[in-house]
Image (cartoon, helix red, strand yellow):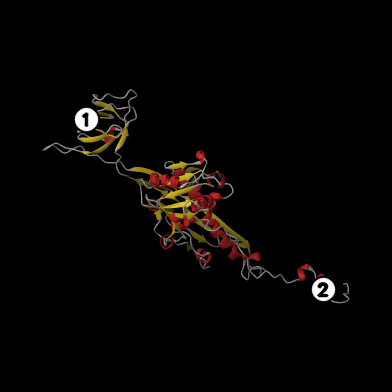
């Protein structure tokens, strides 16, 4: 051992002999509001300690608001939808018709019954339907109006029925309930630590590192569900491990919404107030008068720069559990929700300039009976010198009536 002459300085101490002044904590850097959809559906918006629950050795439900959840009893669950009758269709005859023709073919004759009055918006002619056979209508021309030639693809719109005095009732007409479906997906997030490491004291925490792993595992578990609910594709197939079991994935929002999609990239990608009005006109045509608008960070920045007087602070957070603002249009109001993962590396290649309008009355978190979300503790093998826990959920997205929602994309940086 060498002797030290003179004053003892810091260079005289071995590195591992010095006190590690780390404050006894870790400064975690999470993505802010990285699970906005799951937060709305009632699964998050809580502290990590509430999420993990007390270490009681049993299972802990990740409980949340019930307003947007649905318990299902099969891995494939059905979604039945209905909507009001349409009134308009188009002429389907390349040569068109003269003002004297009284038999016409249309795209969808099922919209009409005898005694219906029908408007031709292009010419302002009104005619009676006297009979229908498939898509062929027999009509009486020029009712209170002047008969005019009909062109191929002219729109015709049902106004109402008009019956003669002392006539019989007309033919009943109704919609047919539509069926769609999705699958529950099994989400499992494992947390494992050896006994020695679990019981060791750390410089950055007075507690076992098991606590940190549980907290971060809970967040990652919810992030996984969030991503699947947006980007997942519906599928059922034989398991990839060749066990003979079935393996399912839940379809996400981007798979289900294929109508009401507005892409402005071809026009330069500049977001303007008229474009937002046109998008609002489209998505508020059906569904509720308030929609959640999940916005990429880029989209939200561009929207903020449009017209600050249209963006207002609102107390909606008490209803949805989120910090929210709203964008007001004459068609309805958008509740703005910042959605960071739209701009993440990878996802941002396609979705960095995207916003998605969701009707809150038409979306739910569907979970299989007894598998809403739970923490399963001590699931390690009997002779394992350590512990293993997992977060388990079997759940899926339920999105009804896709025309009540919409997507605007292609906003440039």
**Residue 265 x/y as whole percent:** 51, 41
Q: Residues within 10 Å of mark 2 (few under 14, many from 20)?
A: few
Relative to 119, is 361 above or below?
below
**Residue 269 x/y as whole percent:** 52, 43
Q: Going by the picture, which residue comes out furthest to the bottom?
A: 6
Q: Secondary structure at mark 1?
A: loop
First-in-chain label (2 vs 1): 2
The residue wearing badge 1 is 142
Q: Going by the picture, which residue comes out furthest to the left?
A: 166
**Residue 232 x/y as whole percent:** 50, 46
- Residue 384 seen in render: no
**Residue 158 x/y as whole percent:** 26, 37
- Residue 324 seen in render: yes
Q: Foreground residue, 46 or 152?
A: 152
Image check: 362 left or right of 338? Answer: left
Q: Secondary structure at mark 2?
A: loop
Image check: 316 left or right of 265? Answer: left
Q: Which dot marks residue 274?
A: none
Relative to 383, is 180 above or below?
above
Image check: 124 left or right of 58? Answer: left
The residue wearing badge 2 is 9
Q: Foreground residue, 135 or 266?
A: 266
- Marks 2, 1: nearer the viewer: 1
Q: Label 2 to label 1, Cα distance in Å?
A: 107 Å
Tell me, yes or no, whether the two marked residues, 2 and 1, touch with CB atoms within 8 Å.
Answer: no
Image check: 85 left or right of 391? Answer: left
Q: Residues within 10 Å of mark 1 (few under 14, many from 20)?
A: some
Q: Quadrant of the N terminus?
A: bottom right
Residue at (36%, 49%) from the top-left corner? 287
Residue at (51%, 61%) from the top-left corner? 375
Q: Foreground residue, 385 or 179?
A: 179
Q: Foreground residue, 104 or 110?
A: 104
């Amino acid at each position: 051992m060498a002797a030290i002459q003179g004053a003892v300085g810091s260079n005289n101490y071995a590195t591992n002999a010095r006190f590690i002044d780390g404050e006894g904590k870790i400064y975690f850097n999470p993505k802010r509001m990285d699970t906005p959809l799951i937060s709305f559906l009632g699964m998050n918006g809580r502290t990590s300690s509430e999420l993990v629950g007390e270490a009681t050795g049993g299972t802990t439900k990740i409980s949340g608001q019930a307003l947007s959840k649905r318990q299902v009893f099969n891995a494939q669950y059905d979604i039945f939808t209905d909507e009001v009758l349409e009134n308009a269709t188009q002429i389907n005859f390349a040569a068109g018709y003269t003002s004297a023709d009284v038999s016409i073919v249309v795209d969808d004759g099922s919209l009409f019954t005898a005694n219906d009055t029908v408007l031709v918006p292009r010419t302002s002619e009104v005619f009676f339907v006297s009979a229908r056979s498939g898509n062929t209508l027999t009509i009486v021309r020029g009712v209170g109006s002047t008969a005019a030639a009909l062109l191929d693809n002219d729109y015709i719109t049902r106004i109402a029925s008009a019956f003669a005095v002392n006539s019989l009732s007309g033919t009943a007409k109704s919609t047919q309930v539509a069926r769609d479906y999705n699958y529950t997906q099994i989400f499992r997030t494992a947390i494992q630590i050896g006994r020695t490491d679990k019981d060791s004291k750390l410089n950055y925490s007075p507690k076992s590192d098991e606590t940190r792993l549980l907290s971060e595992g809970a967040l990652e578990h919810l992030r996984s569900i969030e991503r699947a609910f947006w980007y997942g594709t519906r599928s059922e197939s034989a398991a990839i491990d060749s066990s003979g079991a079935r393996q399912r994935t839940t379809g996400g929002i981007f798979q289900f919404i294929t109508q009401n999609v507005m892409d402005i990239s071809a026009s330069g990608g500049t977001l303007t107030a008229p474009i937002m009005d046109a998008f609002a006109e489209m998505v508020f045509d059906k569904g509720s008068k308030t929609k959640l608008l999940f916005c990429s960070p880029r989209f939200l920045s561009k929207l903020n720069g449009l017209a600050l007087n249209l963006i207002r602070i609102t107390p909606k957070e008490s209803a949805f559990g989120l910090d929210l603002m709203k964008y007001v249009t004459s068609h309805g109001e958008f509740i703005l929700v910042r959605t960071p993962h739209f701009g993440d590396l990878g996802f941002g290649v396609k979705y960095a300039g995207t916003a998605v309008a969701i009707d809150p009355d038409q979306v739910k978190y569907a979970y299989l009976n007894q598998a809403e979300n739970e923490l399963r503790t001590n699931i390690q093998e009997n002779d394992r010198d350590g512990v293993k826990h997992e977060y388990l959920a079997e759940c899926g997205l339920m999105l009804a009536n896709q025309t009540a929602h919409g997507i605007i994309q292609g906003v440039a940086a």
